[in-house]
């Protein structure tokens, strides 16, 4: 049953990530990957909220939301790929900024979510 919950949550998380990325890219005209940054910040805030609440218990909502939904909504692979692309396109300052912003803002968002979730 847990595998089904993870699959359903993962499918929804991936669809929402894609939809938000398409929406943001309609209005953001820059090579800076703001959509991925926003998705990862939102996902980290949500996991902080979840960890601060009772959802951390390994019940159905844990498998559906934390492992499935948030696991596919947030994206380390896109972050890594986009970071390499920025460096490869001779944008080391932008690439470094993207890496620093992603790491610092996602950790901060998780912490804020954790505090708000208690």
Image (cartoon, rainbow, N blue to C red):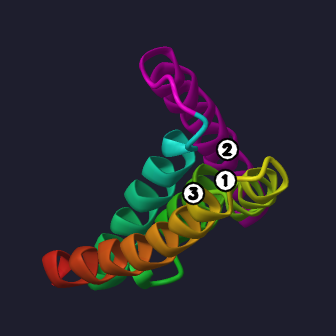
Is any atom of residue 24 visible in this view? Answer: yes
Which mark is first along the chain, 1 or 2?
2
**Element at badge 3?**
helix
Which picture quadrant has residue 93? bottom right
Q: Name the residue under label 1.
A: 72
Indicate the position of residue 89 as horizontal and vertical percent values: 80, 47
> Which label lies toward us, 2 or 3?
3
Compare residues 113 and 93 and report the one nearer the observer: 93
Residue 75 magenta:
no
Q: Name the residue under label 2.
A: 8
Compare residues 57 and 20 and report the one nearer the observer: 20
Which mark is first along the chain, 3 or 1?
1
Is any atom of residue 53 visible in this view? Answer: no
Marks 2 and 1 sit apart, C-alpha to C-alpha, by: 11 Å
> Which label lies toward us, 1 or 3?
3
Indicate the position of residue 74 as horizontal and vertical percent values: 59, 57
Marks 1 and 3 sit apart, C-alpha to C-alpha, by: 26 Å
Labelled pair 1, 3 in contact (Cβ < 8 Å): no
* Farthest-out residue, right: 88
Region in magenta: 1-30
Q: Residues within 10 Å of mark 3 (few under 14, many from 20)?
A: some
Marks 2 and 3 sit apart, C-alpha to C-alpha, by: 36 Å
Indicate the position of residue 62 as horizontal and vertical percent values: 51, 70
The structure residue drawn at horizontal position 67% and vertical position 53%, both measured from the top left corner, is: 72
Compare residues 51 and 45 and report the one nearer the observer: 45
Which quadrant does the C terminus fall into? bottom left
Labelled pair 2, 3 in contact (Cβ < 8 Å): no
Q: Name the residue under label 3.
A: 94
Which picture quadrant has residue 98? bottom right
The structure residue drawn at horizontal position 54% and vertical position 34%, both measured from the top left corner, is: 16
Which mark is first along the chain, 3 or 2?
2
């Amino acid at each position: 049953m847990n595998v089904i919950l993870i699959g359903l949550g993962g499918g929804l998380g991936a669809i929402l990530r894609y939809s938000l990325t398409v929406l943001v890219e309609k209005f953001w005209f820059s090579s800076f990957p703001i959509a991925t940054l926003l998705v990862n910040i939102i996902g980290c805030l949500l996991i902080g909220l979840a960890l601060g609440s009772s959802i951390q218990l390994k019940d159905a909502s844990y498998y559906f939301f934390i492992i499935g939904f948030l696991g596919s909504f947030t994206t380390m692979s896109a972050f890594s790929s986009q970071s390499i692309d920025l460096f490869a396109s001779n944008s080391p300052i932008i690439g470094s900024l993207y890496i620093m912003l992603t790491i610092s803002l996602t950790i901060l968002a998780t912490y804020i979510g954790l505090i708000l979730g208690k």
